[in-house]
Amino acid sequence: MIRCAGLTKVFGSGAAVEQALALAGNGVGRAEIQRRTGATLAVHDVSFEVRPGELFVVMGLSGSGKSTLVRLLNRLIEPSAGSIHIDGRDLNALDDGALRQLRNQRIAMVFQHFALLPHRTVRQNAEYGLQIRGTDPATRREKSDWALAQVGLADRAEAYPGQLSGGMQQRVGLARALASDTDVLLMDEPYSALDPLIRRDMQNLLVRLQSELHKTIVFITHDLNEAMLLGDRILLLKDGRLVQVGTGPEILAAPADDYVADFVSDVDRSRVLTARDVLREPRIAVRVDERPADVLHRLGAAEATGAYVLDEEDRILGVVRDDWLAGAASRGATSIDIGALIDEYRTTQPDRPLIDLVDQVGRHVVPLAVVDERYRLLGVVPRGTLLAALAVPSRS
């Protein structure tokens, strides 16, 4: 949906910009460029793609260039170099009229400080983008009321922004973007002005809405825990340059450099990583038609005391213990008796955070099972694997 190549922005006069671009191309840092030219290198040579329906987070410390980058994506700021394509359309090639149309119909923006019109009601604010577009009043009302219902403000449609809390005002800003029904949402640190409890509510609201609506979202934040919670993928900026792009677990597992490693060292891994991120193939999973003696031999080789028994579709039937297998082998049994299976095991879904799993691992003869919606075994989470994932690597 969004493709950026070599995106660069220098703030300064004409000659200084050209000189700054040349210096940046030679690897000169931001501070030195400003000292030599007086120009500010805000973003340099940033390339990335955002897939349709993806919640893509851009993050970095204050001054890293993230807010400049998001404004480049709808040409609120003109790039000094590079290209931006939205759904295949080259933004640099659009005239003013075509650019206005694209902003009105394809891209909506949610701002940090709400940007509501104080003299308009909540409903009038929510439908403002549609009004600018020329949508008829009945359709504006229908879409704005739908959007307000999505964010939990259906009963405050006639209130004014000054009568709402900060969290409610930000919900109105989000409703305005949803009512516009654009393909792309740009969200520039929308929750940074909110207190922690309201901020968490808004994060959960966005997660729920995204699971239902599947918008393409570029979300700007300086909060790494927020980025890890929300982002399908995360782009990290430092001094205007791209440092790393990847999923939260990928960045935690393999930081690109010492800067990223230090940056992620304080992340609450128990809330970022999920069962899907740490699951392993089960050391032993068997079928009922297997010979108990053979299964017992495999258990011994794996130093295990039990195994999951699966049906033809890999659904869990139960667990068979080594002591039963030993007795069955001595009797010459040729298959596993379903009646001998026990239910001493626990299951979880792949998207459950590790914090929810800590008290479930290591309590049974088999590891915690990760299953899909059809109860098919996807993998297991051994206790040691979970603890290793939560451990922060020491740094020399």
Image (cartoon, rainbow, N blue to C red):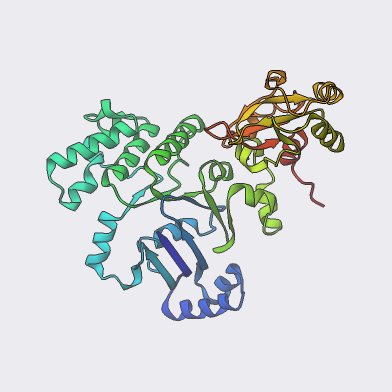
Residue at 24% across / 29% down in the picture?
A: 159
Q: Nearer the viewer, residue 58 or 106?
A: 106
Estimate the x, y position of residue 335 in percent, counting from the top left.
74, 28
For the residue pair 67 and 31, the one nearer the viewer reads as 67
Q: Is residue 100 left or right of residue 234?
A: left
Q: Report if residue 95 is visible in the image.
A: yes
Write the residue at 40% across / 67% down: 84
How far across and how far down the image is residue 227, in percent? Answer: 54, 45
Q: Is residue 119 visible?
A: no
Determine the image quadrant of residue 355.
top right
The number of numbered discs placed on residues in the rendered structure image is: 0
In the picture provided, is 337 more to the left or to the right than 196? Answer: right
The image shows residue 111, relative to residue 317, as above or below, that is below
**Residue 11, quarter of the rendered image:** bottom left
**Quadrant where the N terminus is found in the figure:** bottom left
Position of residue 277 in the picture relative to residue 305 (left or right): left
Residue 273 point in image, percent of width and height: 63, 40
Q: At x 61% / y 70%, what residue is drawn? A: 29
Left or right for 283, reference 227 = right
In the image shown, does 345 or 298 lie closer to the viewer?
298
Residue 298, position as x, y percentages in the image = 82, 36
